[in-house]
Image: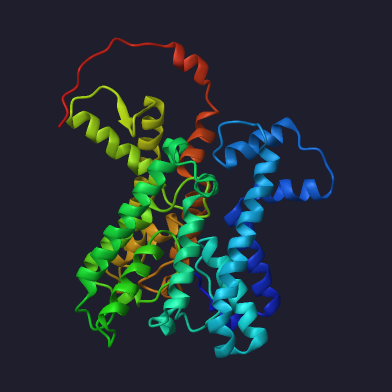
Amino acid sequence: LSIIDVGAQLSGFGQAVLLILIQVGGMGFMVFATLIMVALGKRITLKERMLLRDSMNQTTLAGMVRLTLAFFLMALVIEIAGALLLMTRLIPRYGAAQGVWMSVFTAISAFCNAGFDLFGGYRSLLDFQGDPVVLFTLAVLIMLGGLGFPVIMECLHLKLRRVSLHTKLVLSITAALLLTGTAAVALLEWRNPLTLDNGMNAWQKLMNSFFQSVTFRTAGFASLDQASLSDSSKLIGSLFMFVGASPASTGGGVKTTTVAILFLVVGSVVRGRERICAFGREIAADTARRAMTIVMIGLFLVLGITCALSVLERNSGFALIDLFFEATSAFSTTGLSSVGTPALRPVSQWLLMPLMYLGRVGPLTLALALANRMDSSRLNRVRYPEEKVMIG
C-alpha cells in the first residue's frame, strides 16, 4: 500500500533502507537482535530467550539461539536461490547491475511477504504475466515465507511419523486455501477481458490464477490488475487476506491455524463432541478461546476502518468492496490495492497506518497487553452463578 513509486521515486540508498526494513520486519526484531548480540559476543539472558521464544511461537527455551541462527541461515539460502533464478530473467531485461539488484530486492520482498518491487509505474508483475520462471519463483518464495520457519524445519527433517499437529494443520489448510483460491479466481476471471481473458492461453490463465491465489496470502505482488477484478474475486480475496499466512512466518493475517481451530470448534459442536480434536490429538479449550479472540478483534478492526473509509471517501466514488479490500489488505499487511492507495485522502492513509501496525503486531498481542494492566489473578478468583442463555 505504498503511496510512492518505490522503483521510480526512491534513490538507491532509499531502496536499500527499505530492503533492510523488509528483512527485519519479515524475520522479526528479536531474531535480528539475537544475531547482533551473538556477533558482538554478548550473552543472551533468560528474559531475552523468553522474548525470542514468544516471538517465534516456540514452546521451549532449549536451543533458542541455535534455532534462531538456523532460521536465519535457512532464510538466507532460500532468498539467494530465489534471487539467482530471477537473475536469469531480469539481467537480460535490465542489464547486469540493475538486474542483480532488482533480483535480490524482489526475492527478499517475496520471501518476507512484503510485496514491494522496483519495476516502476505501480505495475508490479503485470509485465511478467506470461513468464513462468518469474511467477513460480516468486510463488514458491511467498509460500515458503508464509509457512513459518518451524514448519519448514520439520519438513526438512522428513520425519513424517513425528510431524507435529501444528505442521499438519498448517500444511493442510495452506493446500486447501491455495487450491480453492486458484479455482475461484479461474472460475470468476476466466472470461474477464481486463484480467485473465486479455490474450492469455489456457495455461497462462491457470498460472496467473494460481499466482493470484498465492499473492492473496499477504504477499502483495500482482500479475493481474487488482482494480479490474470482479467484485466476487475481491470479496474472496479479502477473506483470503484476512486469514493470511501461518504463525512464526513472514506474513500477516489472523493465521491459518487460527481459522483451522475455529472450523474444528464448529465441527465438534455440529457432531456433538465436547472436545476439539484433529489428527488424533486434542486441542486445549484455551487455544480455541484465543483463536476466537483473534478473529473477533481482527473483524472489528477491519470492519471499523472500512466504515470510517466509506465516510471519509464518500465523495471519491470508491465502491464499498474496494474500501473493504483496502482495509483488509492493510490489516493483513498484504499490500494489494484495488483503488490505488495514493488516490485516498491523507486522513484515510493515516487510518490505514495504525491498522497495518496492529495487523503485524497481532490482535492477540494487543489484547493481552491491555489485559495485563488489570489484576487478572483477582478477577479469575471471582465466580458467578451459571445461567443458560438462548443462542442460535
Q: Position of residue 58 (x, y in %)?
A: 56, 36
Is 359 displayed left or right of 386 in the figure?
Answer: right
Q: In this figure, what is the number of numbered marks?
A: 0
361 versus 180 height, above or below:
above
Q: Residue at x 60, y 78 (%)?
A: 102
Residue 170 seen anywhere in this rendered image of the structure:
yes
255 and 172: which is toward the camera? 172
Q: Furthest-right residue in view?
A: 41
Between 215 and 176, the residue placed more toward the observer is 176
Q: Residue at x 72, y 48 (%)?
A: 33
Work out whether residue 114 or residue 3 is closer to the camera in this orientation and state it: 114
Image quadrant in which you'd find residue 42: top right
Q: Position of residue 10 (x, y in %)?
A: 62, 78
What colour-coding does the image apply? rainbow
Left or right side of 279 for 363? right
Estimate the x, y position of residue 165 in percent, counting from the top left: 42, 36
Is residue 307 among what the camera can see? no
- Residue at 42 percent of width and 51 percent of height: 253
Quadrant in which the C terminus appears = top left
Q: Is residue 386 above or below residue 268?
A: above
Q: Position of residue 319 (x, y in %)?
A: 27, 69
Decide: is 90 above or below 173: below
Is 316 left, or right, of 375 in this rendering?
left
Camera-nearest residue between 93 and 307: 93
Write down the quadrant of residue 75 in the picture. Answer: bottom right
